[in-house]
Image (tube, rainbow, N blue to C red):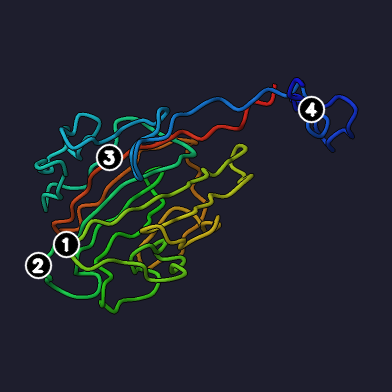
Amino acid sequence: MAEQQAPVGYDDTPMLPGQPYRVHDSKRSAPRVVTPGAGYGDAPSDAVVLFDGSDLSNWQGRDGDAQWKVENGYMEVTPKTGDIQTKEGFGSIQLHLEFACPAEVKGNSQGRGNSGVFLLGGYEVQVLDGYDNPTYADGITGAIYGQFPPLVNATRPPGEWQSYDIIFEAPVYEGETLKSPAYLTVILNGILLHNRKEAMGPTGHKNLSSYDTVHGPTGPLKLQDHGDLVRYRNIWIRNLTDYDAS
Protein backbone atom coordinates (compact mmCIF):
# COMPACT_ATOMS: atom_id res chain seq x y z
CA MET A 1 0.00 0.00 0.00
CA ALA A 2 1.48 3.33 -1.07
CA GLU A 3 2.31 5.78 1.71
CA GLN A 4 -0.13 8.68 1.77
CA GLN A 5 1.55 12.03 1.15
CA ALA A 6 0.71 14.88 3.49
CA PRO A 7 -0.57 18.05 1.78
CA VAL A 8 1.90 20.88 1.29
CA GLY A 9 -0.80 23.48 1.74
CA TYR A 10 -4.49 24.26 1.39
CA ASP A 11 -6.67 26.43 -0.81
CA ASP A 12 -9.94 26.17 1.15
CA THR A 13 -8.94 27.74 4.48
CA PRO A 14 -9.88 31.20 5.87
CA MET A 15 -8.08 34.30 4.62
CA LEU A 16 -5.56 35.81 7.02
CA PRO A 17 -6.59 39.32 8.16
CA GLY A 18 -4.74 42.01 6.25
CA GLN A 19 -2.88 39.48 4.10
CA PRO A 20 -3.44 38.09 0.60
CA TYR A 21 -3.00 34.55 1.89
CA ARG A 22 -5.08 31.83 3.43
CA VAL A 23 -4.17 29.92 6.60
CA HIS A 24 -1.62 27.28 5.49
CA ASP A 25 -1.76 28.72 1.95
CA SER A 26 -0.19 26.40 -0.60
CA LYS A 27 0.73 29.36 -2.83
CA ARG A 28 2.70 31.25 -0.18
CA SER A 29 6.43 31.24 -0.95
CA ALA A 30 8.72 29.31 1.39
CA PRO A 31 11.42 31.04 3.48
CA ARG A 32 14.85 31.19 1.89
CA VAL A 33 17.37 28.61 3.03
CA VAL A 34 20.25 29.68 5.31
CA THR A 35 22.88 27.17 6.37
CA PRO A 36 23.76 27.48 10.10
CA GLY A 37 27.35 27.62 11.29
CA ALA A 38 28.86 24.31 12.37
CA GLY A 39 29.02 25.28 16.06
CA TYR A 40 27.57 27.88 18.40
CA GLY A 41 28.75 31.33 17.40
CA ASP A 42 29.92 30.27 13.94
CA ALA A 43 28.71 32.57 11.18
CA PRO A 44 25.77 31.29 9.12
CA SER A 45 25.86 31.28 5.34
CA ASP A 46 24.27 34.72 4.88
CA ALA A 47 26.37 36.58 7.45
CA VAL A 48 28.67 39.50 6.81
CA VAL A 49 31.88 38.54 8.63
CA LEU A 50 33.39 41.71 10.07
CA PHE A 51 36.30 40.16 11.95
CA ASP A 52 37.60 36.62 11.54
CA GLY A 53 40.77 37.07 13.60
CA SER A 54 43.07 37.90 10.73
CA ASP A 55 42.98 41.66 10.07
CA LEU A 56 41.05 44.91 10.42
CA SER A 57 40.35 45.40 6.71
CA ASN A 58 36.63 45.96 7.42
CA TRP A 59 37.31 48.64 10.03
CA GLN A 60 38.56 52.20 10.20
CA GLY A 61 39.82 54.48 12.97
CA ARG A 62 39.37 58.15 13.69
CA ASP A 63 42.30 59.12 11.47
CA GLY A 64 42.07 56.45 8.78
CA ASP A 65 43.15 52.85 9.29
CA ALA A 66 42.12 51.14 12.53
CA GLN A 67 45.11 51.03 14.90
CA TRP A 68 44.06 48.30 17.33
CA LYS A 69 46.32 45.31 17.81
CA VAL A 70 45.49 42.01 16.09
CA GLU A 71 47.07 38.76 17.28
CA ASN A 72 46.14 35.16 18.11
CA GLY A 73 42.74 35.46 16.45
CA TYR A 74 41.52 38.51 18.34
CA MET A 75 41.72 42.30 18.20
CA GLU A 76 42.62 44.30 21.30
CA VAL A 77 41.95 47.93 22.12
CA THR A 78 45.09 50.02 21.76
CA PRO A 79 44.44 52.82 24.24
CA LYS A 80 44.44 56.41 22.98
CA THR A 81 44.09 55.36 19.34
CA GLY A 82 40.34 55.95 19.48
CA ASP A 83 37.20 54.03 18.68
CA ILE A 84 37.04 51.89 15.56
CA GLN A 85 34.03 51.38 13.32
CA THR A 86 33.03 49.38 10.29
CA LYS A 87 33.57 50.88 6.86
CA GLU A 88 30.14 49.63 5.88
CA GLY A 89 26.90 50.96 7.33
CA PHE A 90 24.07 48.78 8.61
CA GLY A 91 20.46 49.23 9.70
CA SER A 92 18.46 46.51 11.43
CA ILE A 93 20.79 43.62 12.20
CA GLN A 94 21.50 40.45 14.09
CA LEU A 95 24.97 40.78 15.63
CA HIS A 96 27.25 38.19 17.17
CA LEU A 97 30.54 39.10 18.82
CA GLU A 98 32.76 37.80 21.59
CA PHE A 99 34.78 39.86 24.05
CA ALA A 100 37.13 39.38 26.96
CA CYS A 101 37.99 41.93 29.64
CA PRO A 102 41.58 41.94 30.98
CA ALA A 103 42.46 39.00 33.21
CA GLU A 104 44.52 41.34 35.40
CA VAL A 105 41.98 43.34 37.38
CA LYS A 106 42.73 47.04 37.57
CA GLY A 107 40.41 49.78 38.72
CA ASN A 108 36.79 49.55 39.74
CA SER A 109 33.31 50.51 38.60
CA GLN A 110 33.49 52.10 35.12
CA GLY A 111 37.29 52.07 35.24
CA ARG A 112 37.51 48.29 34.91
CA GLY A 113 37.46 46.51 31.55
CA ASN A 114 35.35 49.22 29.94
CA SER A 115 34.42 49.36 26.26
CA GLY A 116 31.16 49.41 24.32
CA VAL A 117 29.30 48.15 21.27
CA PHE A 118 27.52 50.93 19.38
CA LEU A 119 24.77 49.92 16.95
CA LEU A 120 24.10 52.37 14.13
CA GLY A 121 27.12 54.21 15.53
CA GLY A 122 25.18 55.56 18.50
CA TYR A 123 23.13 53.01 20.45
CA GLU A 124 25.46 51.48 23.07
CA VAL A 125 25.34 48.10 24.69
CA GLN A 126 27.87 48.32 27.50
CA VAL A 127 31.01 46.19 27.66
CA LEU A 128 32.52 46.13 31.15
CA ASP A 129 34.18 43.76 33.57
CA GLY A 130 30.99 43.45 35.60
CA TYR A 131 32.09 40.40 37.59
CA ASP A 132 31.92 41.28 41.31
CA ASN A 133 32.31 44.94 40.36
CA PRO A 134 29.71 47.33 41.81
CA THR A 135 28.78 50.22 39.51
CA TYR A 136 25.66 52.13 38.50
CA ALA A 137 22.96 49.78 37.21
CA ASP A 138 22.52 51.34 33.77
CA GLY A 139 26.27 51.07 33.17
CA ILE A 140 26.88 47.43 34.08
CA THR A 141 27.74 44.82 31.43
CA GLY A 142 24.80 44.37 29.08
CA ALA A 143 23.10 47.65 29.95
CA ILE A 144 21.62 49.81 27.24
CA TYR A 145 23.96 52.49 28.47
CA GLY A 146 22.40 55.29 30.48
CA GLN A 147 18.90 53.95 29.88
CA PHE A 148 18.15 50.41 31.04
CA PRO A 149 20.00 47.94 33.30
CA PRO A 150 20.05 44.32 32.12
CA LEU A 151 17.53 41.93 33.63
CA VAL A 152 20.43 40.04 35.27
CA ASN A 153 24.21 40.23 35.62
CA ALA A 154 25.38 37.27 33.51
CA THR A 155 29.07 38.13 33.31
CA ARG A 156 31.92 35.62 33.43
CA PRO A 157 35.14 36.19 35.46
CA PRO A 158 37.74 38.58 34.02
CA GLY A 159 39.88 37.12 31.26
CA GLU A 160 37.21 34.66 30.07
CA TRP A 161 35.59 34.97 26.66
CA GLN A 162 31.98 36.10 26.66
CA SER A 163 29.44 36.33 23.86
CA TYR A 164 26.87 38.91 22.81
CA ASP A 165 23.99 38.12 20.50
CA ILE A 166 22.06 41.29 19.74
CA ILE A 167 19.00 41.99 17.62
CA PHE A 168 18.84 45.67 16.72
CA GLU A 169 15.82 47.20 15.02
CA ALA A 170 16.75 50.57 13.58
CA PRO A 171 14.50 53.58 14.19
CA VAL A 172 12.43 54.97 11.33
CA TYR A 173 11.84 58.66 10.63
CA GLU A 174 9.39 60.32 8.28
CA GLY A 175 11.05 63.63 7.62
CA GLU A 176 11.80 64.98 11.09
CA THR A 177 9.09 62.90 12.78
CA LEU A 178 9.96 59.64 14.53
CA LYS A 179 7.71 56.92 13.13
CA SER A 180 9.21 53.99 15.03
CA PRO A 181 11.91 53.93 17.75
CA ALA A 182 14.88 51.58 17.97
CA TYR A 183 14.44 48.23 19.73
CA LEU A 184 17.15 46.00 21.18
CA THR A 185 17.14 42.36 22.19
CA VAL A 186 20.37 41.48 24.00
CA ILE A 187 21.65 38.05 25.03
CA LEU A 188 24.87 37.69 27.03
CA ASN A 189 26.43 34.25 27.39
CA GLY A 190 23.15 32.65 26.35
CA ILE A 191 21.07 34.60 28.90
CA LEU A 192 18.44 37.15 27.92
CA LEU A 193 19.17 40.65 29.21
CA HIS A 194 16.71 42.76 27.18
CA ASN A 195 13.65 41.54 25.28
CA ARG A 196 12.89 43.96 22.44
CA LYS A 197 13.53 46.93 24.69
CA GLU A 198 12.53 50.28 23.26
CA ALA A 199 15.54 52.61 23.28
CA MET A 200 15.12 56.22 24.35
CA GLY A 201 17.42 57.36 21.55
CA PRO A 202 21.15 57.30 20.82
CA THR A 203 23.36 56.87 23.88
CA GLY A 204 24.55 59.78 25.97
CA HIS A 205 26.67 60.16 29.10
CA LYS A 206 25.11 61.85 32.14
CA ASN A 207 22.25 63.16 30.01
CA LEU A 208 18.86 62.04 28.71
CA SER A 209 18.75 60.33 25.35
CA SER A 210 16.23 61.42 22.73
CA TYR A 211 15.36 61.17 19.05
CA ASP A 212 15.38 64.94 18.59
CA THR A 213 18.36 64.82 16.24
CA VAL A 214 17.27 63.06 13.06
CA HIS A 215 19.73 60.49 11.72
CA GLY A 216 19.84 58.12 8.78
CA PRO A 217 18.53 54.55 8.61
CA THR A 218 22.01 53.03 8.57
CA GLY A 219 25.30 53.56 10.36
CA PRO A 220 28.51 51.77 11.33
CA LEU A 221 29.05 49.24 14.07
CA LYS A 222 31.44 50.96 16.47
CA LEU A 223 33.68 49.54 19.21
CA GLN A 224 34.86 51.85 21.95
CA ASP A 225 38.36 52.70 23.10
CA HIS A 226 37.76 53.54 26.76
CA GLY A 227 41.40 53.02 27.67
CA ASP A 228 41.16 49.37 28.78
CA LEU A 229 42.70 46.35 27.03
CA VAL A 230 39.44 44.71 26.02
CA ARG A 231 39.62 42.02 23.33
CA TYR A 232 37.14 41.12 20.59
CA ARG A 233 36.80 38.18 18.20
CA ASN A 234 34.33 36.38 15.92
CA ILE A 235 32.24 39.37 14.85
CA TRP A 236 29.54 38.90 12.25
CA ILE A 237 26.29 40.53 11.23
CA ARG A 238 23.14 39.45 9.44
CA ASN A 239 21.14 42.19 7.77
CA LEU A 240 17.50 41.85 8.79
CA THR A 241 14.86 42.32 6.13
CA ASP A 242 11.18 41.52 6.15
CA TYR A 243 10.24 38.06 4.98
CA ASP A 244 9.38 38.24 1.30
CA ALA A 245 5.86 36.86 1.15
CA SER A 246 5.36 37.66 -2.53
Marks 3 and 1: in contact by CB < 8 Å?
no
Amino acid type, mark 2: Glu
Q: Report, in whole angstroms, how far the alpha carbon at label 1 lies from the one at label 3.
A: 24 Å
Location of the C terminus (image quadrant): top right
Residue displayed at 34% across by 44% down: 41
Amino acid type, mark 3: Gln
Marks 2 and 1: in contact by CB < 8 Å?
yes
Residue displayed at 52% across by 26% down: 33
Earlier residue among tags 3 and 2: 3
Earlier residue among tags 1 and 2: 2
Q: Report, in whole angstroms, how far the alpha carbon at label 4 lies from the one at label 2.
A: 58 Å
Q: Nearer the viewer, mark 4 or mark 2?
A: 4
Decide: is 65 above or below 246. Answer: below
Residue 156: x, y in percent? Answer: 27, 66
Q: Nearer the viewer, mark 1 or mark 3?
A: 1
Q: Which residue is mark 3?
A: 85
Residue 96 placement: quadrant: top left
Q: Which residue is mark 1?
A: 159
Q: Report, in whole angstroms, how far the alpha carbon at label 3 lies from the one at label 2.
A: 26 Å
Mark 4, other Cα within 10 Å: few <14 / some 14–19 / many ≥20: some
Mark 2, other Cα within 10 Å: few <14 / some 14–19 / many ≥20: few
Residue 112: x, y in percent? Answer: 19, 68
Q: Report, in whole angstroms, how far the alpha carbon at label 4 lies from the one at label 3.
A: 44 Å
- The image's mark for residue 25 is 4
Disc 2 on helix, strand or loop?
A: loop
Relative to 243, 41 lies left or right? left
Amino acid type, mark 1: Gly
Marks 3 and 4: in contact by CB < 8 Å?
no
Q: Report, in whole angstroms, how far the alpha carbon at label 1 lies from the one at label 4.
A: 52 Å
Amino acid type, mark 4: Asp
Residue displayed at 56% across by 25% down: 32
